[in-house]
Amino acid sequence: MTEFSVVAEGLAFPEGPVWMPDGSLLIVELAAGTVSRILPDGRKQVIATPGGSPNGAALGPDGFLYICNSGGFAWTRRDGYLWPMPDAPEYSGGRIERIDITTGKVEELYRACNGHPLAGPNDLVFDAHGGFYFTDHGKRRSRDLDCGGLYYARADGSLIRELAYPLTTPNGVGLSPDGKTVYAAETDSGHIWAWDVVEPGTLAPPEGFLPGRHIAGPPGFTSWDSMAVDCAGTLHVASLFRGGIASIAPVGTALGFLPLPDPLTTNICFDADERDAFVTLSGTGRLVTLKASHLARVIT
């Protein structure tokens, strides 16, 4: 099993880790509806309470934290792990929110695109122009499932644009280091798609009937969560059920798999120099760190 250190534990389904220059990390806690700062000594400070289920998070160029809020889940504990379930009794609708990490003020930016409500925004990544790509995972209920999609939005609340729809439970989203390719990973299908960026928020149309350029399919049973793209362009994708991080070249070649002791391994981020990786083991409520050199990577 992979060698790692526990940064914090006892968390309520943590996701969306964001490394901060002072050595702390920002995380969301889906089951608590909160955003917290994890200090270098492992202490937790709740900095905002947006409610719902705050999911993916990213620091904007303005210093505010932007989150995808999926609106809420029901929860159950099974075999020692906390699991999200459909039919949340207090589902409050999907939205994109901006949080002042100093005051904790939560501001709602988007709830709909072209008149269609956001169902379950999941993950986001900023480009070099101050806008961000985000996935809407859709919403699962006991008897049906919403389609999901890939979107682009401006951080000032002035524009939201649908880029790829429908997708099957899109989850992780990432950008190539040069900003010319955006990736999305589908949870239920185990597929990873890529699109060429023509200009910020505009993608080259896909060929044929596929939603995008197919990068990778599931090696056996695979259920993807969020991803991080490193400076060499390697995609590091959290794998549900298998429990770990899969490393994939931008052309789709599987480079390696790093197992971790939680079937709900959900998110990964890096520090500034990409020496350390931080991973959320959500089913057991832990944020852990490991050496990024343990991950397989494209050599440039």
Image: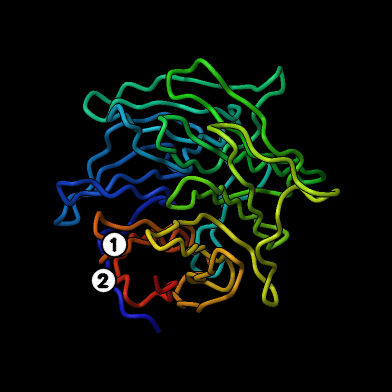
How many numbered markers are drawn? 2
Seen at 52% across and 71% down, the residue is 246
Q: Which mark is residue 189?
A: none
Q: Residue placed farthest to the bottom in the image? A: 1
Q: Is residue 133 left or right of residue 102?
A: right
289, 88: nearer the viewer: 289
Instruction: Say which label, 2 or 1, has the lower sequence index.
Output: 2
x and y percentages locating residue 10 in the rendered image: 33, 57
Q: Is residue 26 left or right of residue 298?
A: left
Seen at 64% across and 47% down, the residue is 195
Label 1's element? Answer: loop
Q: Which quarter of the figure has residue 229?
A: bottom left
173, 13: nearer the viewer: 173
Q: Indicate which label's residue lies in the foreground, 2 or 1.
A: 1
Q: Badge 1, how many Cα within 10 Å: few under 14, some, many 20+?
A: few
x and y percentages locating residue 190 in the rendered image: 68, 63
Q: Which residue is mark 1?
A: 274
x and y percentages locating residue 135 in the rendered image: 59, 41
* Image quarter hosting the C terminus: bottom left
Please name the amino acid that badge 1 sits on: Glu
Label 2's element? Answer: strand
159, 279: nearer the viewer: 159
x and y percentages locating residue 236 in the rendered image: 47, 64
Q: Badge 2, how many Cα within 10 Å: few under 14, some, many 20+?
A: few
Q: Which mark is residue 5?
A: 2
Q: Residue placed farthest to the right in the image? A: 209
Above or below — where is 148 with respect to 113? Answer: below
Q: Is residue 160 left or right of residue 269?
A: right
* Image quarter hosting the N terminus: bottom left
Seen at 71% across and 44% down, the residue is 140
Q: Are marks 2 and 1 in contact (CB under 8 Å)?
A: no
